[in-house]
Structure formats: C-alpha cells, structure tokens
Image (cartoon, helix red, strand yellow):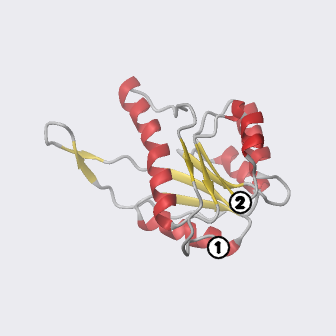
Amino acid sequence: MNAHPLPTAEKEADPLGHQQPKPFHRILLVDDDLANRSLNSKVLIRSGYEVDTAEDGQAGWEALQTRGYDLLVTDNTMPRLSGLELIKKLRSAQMMLPVVLASGTLGIADLKQNQWLRIAATLWKPFNAGQLLETVKDALSVTDTFRTREGFSFPSLAKPFRNVEPTSHWGLNE
C-alpha cells in the first residue's frame, strides 16, 4: 500500500458566491497490474485526490481495515481476493463505502446476481483517463450530497447509477 500526501485544499463557491474549502477525498485503488495501478493513481492524484494503492484484493482488504476512505476503485480479476470477493467482504462488514468496479471480463449476469453489493459504478475495460475521472467524480458527488444534506460524514450509496462502456480508442487499460 502506498500513501500519498494530502493535496492543497481547493476552494469552491457556494450558491451565494462565498468560497468554501473543497472536501478532500481519499481513494483506495486496488489493481494487480502494476502499470494500470500506477497510471490510474497518477491520474487521480493529479486531479487532487489522495490515493492509496493495493496490489490485490487481500492487500486492499487490509488497507480498508486500517484507514478510512471515501471511495474504493477496484479491478475484478486479481489473485488472492477478486474485486467481487473484496466488495462482498466490505458489505458483510457493514462498510457502506461507494465502490467503482473495473472489469473487462465480468458479465452483466454476474452483476445482476450480486445487486446486494450496491456497486456505485462499473468501468468496462479498456477505459480512458476521462472516463475514470468522470466516474470517480460522480461516485463521490453522491457521498458529498449525502454529507451536506445530513450534516455528518457517513458515505451513503445510491442505487447503481452508471455503467461506463469501453472506449474504442487508446486508453489507460488497453
């Protein structure tokens, strides 16, 4: 697991034009492919997120036990513990963390059989940096909306809101 320092706080305007500190978001990125893990974490870090990485589902589970996260982005096909198995452990432990599942092999039938996992989004491989960032932003906006509306910091999961289709052009995970 690699930890990265907190980014400098950004300011965003509220509806009245006052500057409010933008909340920091801590993301756990789990992928057994070193090149994908490195590239995707760099994209997220450059976009202002704090990112920890794990090399497989088991290492991801250990990270989830020791540190709080706002979002989990996980590959599915990995040694020791697959992405789906990781999410099952997460839900069995009553962790309501939003999850983005990346896969090039998982079928729609598998997702339908596991709707109880409440996966916020799926990224179908190959995906590009823009698709990754848009999906992460959307998943985190659900959490931010809940935090703002309810006045406390507990990530909420909405119904699964998006499936990102694979891109036909060069991307991060080809």
Which residue type does callout 2 highlight?
A: Gly
Q: Nearer the viewer, residue 73 or 161?
A: 161
In the rendered image, residue 148, in percent from the top left (x then y), is placed at: 36, 31
Contact (Cβ within 8 Å) of mark 2 with mark 1: no
Question: Mark 1 — residue?
Answer: 174
In the rendered image, residue 166, in percent from the top left (x then y), is placed at: 59, 61
- Asked whether, in this view, residue 1 is left or right of residue 170, the answer is right
Q: Residue furthest left?
A: 17
In the rendered image, residue 63, in percent from the top left (x then y), is placed at: 68, 52
Q: Quadrant of the N terminus?
A: bottom right
**Residue that appears at 41% across and 38% down:** 144
**Residue that appears at 56% across and 72% down:** 171
In the rendered image, residue 146, in percent from the top left (x then y), is placed at: 43, 30
Which residue type does callout 1 highlight?
A: Glu
**Residue that appears at 69% across and 29% down:** 94
- Disc assigned to residue 19: none
Question: Mark 2 — residue?
Answer: 104
> Mark 1, residues whose alpha carbon is within 10 Å: few (<14), some, or many (≥20)?
few
- Asked whether, in this view, residue 26 is left or right of residue 21, the answer is right
Q: Can residue 93 be seen by looking at this rendering?
A: no
> Mark 2, residues whose alpha carbon is within 10 Å: few (<14), some, or many (≥20)?
some
- Residue 47 image-quadrant placement: bottom left
